Image (cartoon, helix red, strand yellow):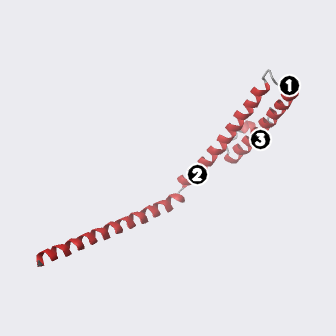
């Protein structure tokens, strides 16, 4: 009987010790992960990745605007469009094209990606 009780007590103590070690390991891993994420947030590589991600979004929006402008051009070329609607669509297309070009120039100036030959030239559309 005494042997059975001692085996039971040692088993319970072993399980409790194992659980304690597992919890301590998980807490240590979490603190290591937190320290790594803090270092990564301030690292130059992560800052550059965030900037590239933002620039990618801006360029994506500009491309979407260009596609929408081309869709306006295709609608203006249709056969079922009245001359007044055609003039209005062409004017709208031209306004959007100028707006997209202006946004692109501002974006390129901000990122330093504007070629020297176009910095002073006016956009023709």
SS class of the residue under badge 1? loop
How crowded pointer 1 is (Cα within 10 Å; few <14, some 14-19, many 20+) is rated as few
- Residue bearing the label numbered 3: 102
Residue 14 on image: x %, y %: 23, 71
Dot placed on the residue nearer the N-terminal end, 2 or 1? 2
Q: Quadrant of the C terminus?
A: top right
Residue 21 on image: x %, y %: 31, 68
Give the Cα distance between marks 3 and 2.
24 Å
State yes or no: discs 3 and 1 in contact (Cβ < 8 Å): no
Q: Residue at x 62, y 48 (%)?
A: 54
Residue reaching furthest to the top:
79
- Residue bearing the label numbered 1: 82
- Asked where in the image residue 116 lies, by quadrant, the reply is top right
Q: Residue at x 62, y 44 (%)?
A: 56
Q: Quadrant of the N terminus?
A: bottom left
Is 57 on the left or on the right of 105, as rendered?
left
- Asked where in the image residue 63 lies, by quadrant, the reply is top right
Q: Residue at x 75, y 37 (%)?
A: 118
How crowded pointer 2 is (Cα within 10 Å; few <14, some 14-19, many 20+) is rated as few
How crowded pointer 3 is (Cα within 10 Å; few <14, some 14-19, many 20+) is rated as some
């Amino acid at each position: 009987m005494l042997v059975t009780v001692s085996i039971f007590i040692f088993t319970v103590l072993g399980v409790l010790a194992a659980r304690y070690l597992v919890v301590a390991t998980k807490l240590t891993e979490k603190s290591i992960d937190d320290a790594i994420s803090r270092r990564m947030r301030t690292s130059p590589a992560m800052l550059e990745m965030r900037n590239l991600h933002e620039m990618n979004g801006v360029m994506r929006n500009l491309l979407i605007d260009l596609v929408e402008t081309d869709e306006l051009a295709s609608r203006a070329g249709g056969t079922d469009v009245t001359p007044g609607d055609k003039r209005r669509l062409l004017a709208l297309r031209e306004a959007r094209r100028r707006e997209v070009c202006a946004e692109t120039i501002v974006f390129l100036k901000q990122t330093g990606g504007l070629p020297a030959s176009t910095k002073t030239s006016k956009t023709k559309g």
